[in-house]
Image (tube, rainbow, N blue to C red):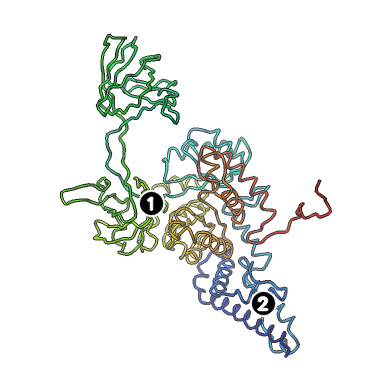
Amino acid sequence: MSRDEATITQLIGAVSELRGEALRMERRFARDIALVHPSYRRSARNLLHYLALRQHDIRPLQTQLAALGLSSLGRCEANTLAGLNAVLAALIRLAGPTAQRAKRLKISKPPVDFVTGPLLLRRHTQRLLGRRPPHRTAHIMVTMPSEAAHDANLVQSLLRSGMDIMRINGAHDDAAAWRAMVGHLKRARRATGLRCRILVDLAGPKLRTGALETEPGVLKIRPDRDRRGVVTSPARVWLVPAGQAPPLAASGSVVVPVNGDLPTEVSHVVVHDVRGKKRRLTVESGEGPSLLCTSDRTVYLEAGARVVFFAKRDRRGSGRVGALTAATPPILLRSGDRLVLTRTATAGHPARRGPRGLEPARIPCTLPEVFRDVRPGEPVWFDDGKIGGLVVSNDRREIEIKINHARSAGARLLPDKGINLPLSNLRLSGLTEKDRADLAFADRAADLVGLSFAQRAQDIQKLAMLLAEGKKRPPGIILKIETRRGFEALPRLLLSALRTPPVGVMVARGDLAVEVGFDRLAEVQEEILWLCEAAHVPAIWATQVLENLTKKGAPSRAEVTDAATAVRAECVMLNKGPHVREAVAFLDDVLRRMQDHHDKNRATLRKLSVADGSKRAR
């Protein structure tokens, strides 16, 4: 046997072993496959074949196969066994007569091939997300802002710009607002003839910081100054009777509520600053009972401050500043500080001196159930990873944390900020009481229902059972992968979800980045896309897509590249923002252009105009 024949014989053995392991994995999970919906069993088998393949590091094998001009198995997600069979058959044909006689292998028929695998993914995508848009392969999902409940034109403009799926976030607004959004969409669909499905995203067991103690509100009135401190424009202040709406002209100006009637024919007003200083406001004009004043001095006002009205030197009356919005001082945390998470809803506070010396900062946690599961030494992250620490102790009433990650100048922690416990084994149900109540709305209105923080197979089955009650075609389920445990359990979650299709997976990159680490996010989102393709399940690329464009009106270079990469998913989600309409149109154009260059993870070689060397530069 020649050296080449020996190499090919060795490769035949290696590929045969991989194929054997794929078939053994399928046999091992035969009971799970039997529970899968008949239309999705081929997909479940392919997923198991792919998992068996990815249990090995086959990079040296890939290099050898590529050197022979064969497939390196780098694009076999949708048809794993067919890919192994094709490589094995090619190797046997390349082998010499001796190797061919020694390798009379039986090639098992794969569940899907190079045509039917991708075809199943397209069919499952259409069943879940609706018919593919005529001019692009990926759907566009848009999160509805609160304004969509009363602005029908906004909904219709989003639909015309390219929105294929309306996302209603169950963590915001209420059922009345959601019904209004759905009503606007139905009318927009009739007016435009365009299709658009509805996703109701259940809020799930969101772990957040609770309330902090408040302080009396202080209103700062400040004129504009140049670099030398010279006033370039006085501050504009509207004095308005407490309880009355300010005039339309007050938009953009400081509004101060005043208890009592405001006198007319006033030249100026003297207010008592919280620092014990008297400040003079010049009355410029009036509108109804309100007075427009200006000031070239900085003024700090709080509720109850005295206000005295003058007509030149004559006093015309007085009043008091009315109720102002209370202030919530944040907790400023630096590396080395201590923070106490409390189980009770008592408002927290920054670090302060107490009877027993310096007391650490305290803040309540919205889910007291986590106190039974958190262990010392486990990491804790706050506010999308801006602040991090390690658990020092947990007596099931309070969790003490030592901060080890914060900006050098300190990081501010406020109420209603996310808490992530990536290594804690939290025994939380994925369906809260609020979620169950919101399902009453979702049952009537939704084409899709999102399961937040999906990480347990039993939660998927429970949701599927609730959605199926009394319905011939229940809504599809979207598994939102946003925790480390959810990512690690994804193969099991997919096998469970395939029992009650249609199903999709959302790569919720916000919480997921905090949970797995920002340095691992790119790797993890790739793995999720691969597993979804192997299961022929549509993937949704979500969180902070074109974030700057949506919120500020101009995209960054990095997020344009991110949006272009998202073409490999079956759907891309945009969050709400004042420029969301422009973002939908921009994303529609990017996805349309990029689909000519990519088909999932494979580059497609469209003709490039720059490759024509016969055209000379002018």
Q: Residue at 77%, 51% (x, y): give it.
A: 609
Which disc number belongs to residue 408?
1
* Residue 463 located left or right of residue 319: right
Residue 66 relative to residue 34: left or right: right
Locate residue 599 relative to residue 521 in the image: left or right: right
* Coordinates of residue 218 in the picture (x, y in percent): 31, 32
Q: Quadrant of residue 81?
A: bottom right
* Horizontal relation, residue 54 to residue 106: left or right: left
As helix, strand or loop, the secondary structure at mark 2 comes to: helix
* Image location of residue 155, percent across then percent down: 55, 37
Q: For label 2, count other residues whose C-alpha is less than 10 Å away and answer few (under 14), some (14-19) or many (20+).
A: some
Residue type highlighted by circle 1: Ser
Q: Work out which residue is located at the far right of the displayed protein and give it.
A: 614
Q: Amino acid at mark 2?
A: Gln
Viewer-proximal residue, 184 or 147?
Answer: 147
SS of the residue at dot 1? Answer: loop
Q: Quadrant of the N terminus?
A: bottom right
Quadrant of the image occupied by residue 308:
top left
Along the polypeptide, which appears first: circle 1 or circle 2? 2
Do the CB atoms of the residues marked 1 and 2 lie less than 8 Å apart?
no
Q: Count the labels in the image.
A: 2
User: Percent position (x, y) of residue 246?
Assistant: 39, 22
> Residue 544: x percent and y percent?
51, 48
Q: Residue at x 47, y 58 (%)?
A: 518
- Residue 64 image label: 2
User: Which residue is rendered at x = 61% and y = 52% of the image?
Assistant: 564
- Tell me the CA gap for discs 1 and 2: 50 Å
Above or below residue 173? Residue 9 is below
The one of 219 and 163 positioned closer to us in this rendering: 219
Residue 64 visible (yes or no): yes
Q: Quadrant of the C terminus?
A: top right
